[in-house]
Image (cartoon, helix red, strand yellow):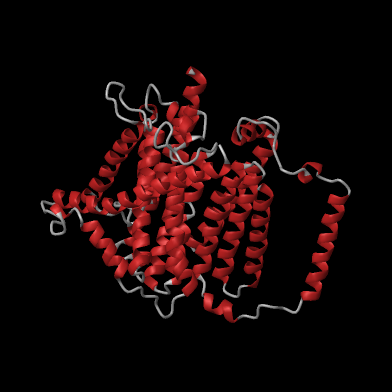
Amino acid sequence: MGIVAEALIALVKIAVVLGVVSLVVAYLTYLERKIIAHIQMRLGPMRVGWHGLLQPIADGLKLFLKEDIIPDKADKIVFVIAPVMVLVPAFVVYSVLPFSQNFYITQINVGLFFILAVSSLGVFGIVMAGWASNSKYSLLGALRSAAQMLSYEIFLGFSLIGPLMLAGSLNLQRIVEAQGDVWFVFYQPLAFVVFFIASLAETNRVPFDLPEAETELVAGFHTEYSGMKFAFFFLAEYANIMVTTAVAVALFFGGWQGIDWIPLPGFVWYLLKMGVLIFVFIWLRATLPRYRYDQLMRLGWKFMFPLVMANIFLTGLVKYLFL
Amino acid sequence: MELLFFYIFAAGIVGASLLMVTRANVIHAALSLVLAFLFMAGLFVLAGAEFLAGVQILVYAGGIMVLYLFSIMLMNVGVSIRLRQWHRQSVLALAAALLLAAEIWMVLGRGGYPEARRWPWKLGETPGNVEALGQVLYTKFLFPFEVASMLLLAAMIGAIVLAKRRITR
């Protein structure tokens, strides 16, 4: 196969993944509004289309046509780059996710590490946005966010070590294949709990949505943003939710592997499992109150950090003694 | 193809580093440094060291530089823009740079680091960079590895002690 053909196939794959992800992200906002509405005994969006099904498209058009305001005292260059810096890492990560046995954009040896590294760049966009807006609310929101994301990145990274030790590879496809018999969530329940809590914090979701706590910070780091730039932050947040659930599925729930006697293609299993986890994300938002900042840090460093360390130690011990 | 990418990354590093030292605004300088780190990660990938590239991004770009930005943002950036940026030391700096260039030229010219000059760089036929690195790190270089971790631990305790004193006062 020629290099041109290979490049074309890669481009088509990237286009498919990007298109699907963008569409799904738009509809996640709809799903979130609907689910929360029903949990709170409301109906949610009902006007645009059947049961409000066209609402995300109307919202997108609205954001697209809105006036794009750059504050007078803002640092123009950084202000414009910041939303891009948030969105790009969130989408780049999809390039290594193994959606099924043979559908993935690329496979690299350090796949999981690549995801961790690239998604750690998302903090920059938030910090840049907060600083460039030249507003106290934004700066405070950005500082909170940076501290929170840096701390929880550590627990997130450490919680992945347990399953990695079992799989013996950083390649996501290899990790999925290692779960042929038993999903790692049964071997590594502690790691999964810590991973899930840390990913809630990484994506700034309730109960860790301090960076954008509406009641005290207006909207946190994106207070000054409007129009498409605001939409970029919004998209990135939901794209990140999908990434964390996708990583969770690949590492803890057997990826594209399903139950044998139900013949469904691999990527359907993958998306189904992701859907269940995303539902839990939204469910939590409708259920839990927000943590205070000191509680957030205490929970992280004094409870979750020793927990993941113990988990790594235990995994090593069990592996040494019985395997 | 690889050579083309090498030149792109190298030009990126040089350009971003130049931006970093010439910007008056500290935040812009720090962001240019991040860019330079990203290009360096690209060079590591070309050299077949994917793990190092990941570490470069995760630790330097994603960790250390965020902390830098964090502390810079708490300062008054406006003051730094008004400070004098050039200190009329260009002659001295030029001399030092030439000296360094001559030194590098001599080391490479006399056949130092022969493997660094073999293009394209490949680190042997290992199953994966991570496995190879782990193997070497925990067998051949175990002692230096432990020493380095002790050093980091000491630095960490030192930082905690310094920060703690200020709180109790």
Residue B78 x/y as whole percent = 53, 78
Q: Nearer the viewer, residue B143 or A212?
A: A212
In the displayed structure image, the side of residue A283 where residue B24 appears, left or right: right
**Residue furthest out toward the right:** B110
Q: Is residue A104 left or right of residue A67?
A: right
- Is B96 or B53 nearer to us in this picture? B53
From this viewpoint, is residue B46 visible?
A: yes
Q: Is residue B47 above or below residue B69?
A: above
Number of numbered tags placed on the structure image: 0
Which of the pair B106/A166 is nearer the observer? B106
Q: Is residue A227 left or right of residue A320?
A: left
Give percent across and percent down for residue B111.
86, 46
Direction from residue A185 to residue A45 in the image, left or right: left
Residue drawn at x 29%, y 52% is: A206
Residue A46, image quadrant: bottom left
Give me the residue at 55% from left, 64% from top.
Answer: B31
